[in-house]
Amino acid sequence: MDWPTLSHVAPWHWWALAAVLLILEVLVPGVFLVWLGIAAAVLGLLVALLPLGVPLQLLLFGALSVVSILVGRRVLARLPHSAEADQLNRGAARLIGRTVVLTEPIRHGQGRARVGDGVWPVQGADAPAGSTVRIVAVQGTTLLVRPDGAAEALSPDRAGGSEFR
């Protein structure tokens, strides 16, 4: 087995680099290393077909990497996005529209409500404990609520939040 030197890089070196990059792509979050791995694999093919010096191989790897990244970004941008994917890292946003029961009264716009097996801080119009409210927005870890069945949304002044509609 020969190690790559500045005077000689064999095609299998590039394919080994491609394999390492593709394995790392699986292990790390995001989609980036796959494009570099594709560039290394393509360069391995070129080196197998053409006698290329190491400096030229390195320049080609840089150029192929840039081209691969640009093409990859365009491909990813064209993929359809689902509403579920948009909510993936915004778990609390899934609570919008649910009706919950206040465990503590809302006084001066602040209270607490049971959601599932947890208790969340809520903001909204004053209401007694035990009453039901509907989650209309989420601001950080605070749920913005309005009385269940209320026909109109609360104004931002009453709710104390800018996302409240």
Image (cartoon, rainbow, N blue to C red):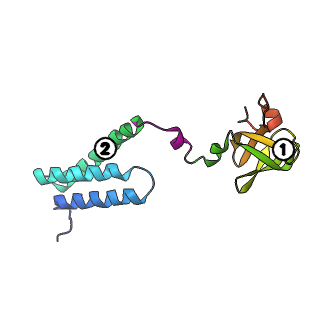
Q: Is residue 104 left or right of residue 38?
A: right
Q: Magenta segment, which residues?
A: 79-87
The answer to whether residue 51 is visible is: no
Percent across and percent down for residue 15 are 22, 58
Percent across and percent down for residue 77 are 41, 37
Q: Is 12 contained in the magenta span? A: no
Q: Is residue 44 left or right of residue 154?
A: left
Q: Quadrant of the N terminus?
A: bottom left
User: In the structure shown, which secondary structural element does the residue marked by tag 1 occupy?
Assistant: loop
Q: Residues within 10 Å of mark 1 (few under 14, many from 20)?
A: some
Q: Which mark is residue 63?
A: none
Residue type at mark 2 is Ser
Q: Residue at x 87, y 40 (%)?
A: 126
Q: Nearer the viewer, mark 2 or mark 1?
A: 1
Q: Quadrant of the C terminus?
A: top right
The answer to which of 153 and 133 lies nearer the viewer is 133
Q: Is residue 20 left or right of residue 154?
A: left
Q: Is residue 124 placed above or below 4 in the rendered structure?
A: above
The answer to whether residue 41 is visible is: yes
Q: Residues within 10 Å of mark 2 (few under 14, many from 20)?
A: some
User: In the structure shown, which secondary structural element does the residue marked by tag 2 occupy?
Assistant: helix
Q: Residue at x 19, y 61 (%)?
A: 12
Residue placed under numbered mark 1 in the picture: 131
The answer to which of 64 and 31 lies nearer the viewer is 31
Q: Is residue 115 placed above or below 4 in the rendered structure?
A: above
Measure the C-alpha gap from mark 2 to mark 1.
57 Å
Q: Which mark is residue 68?
A: 2
Which residue is at the far top?
A: 152
Write down the quadrant of residue 159 in the picture. top right
Q: Residue at x 28, y 59 (%)?
A: 19
Residue type at mark 1 is Ser
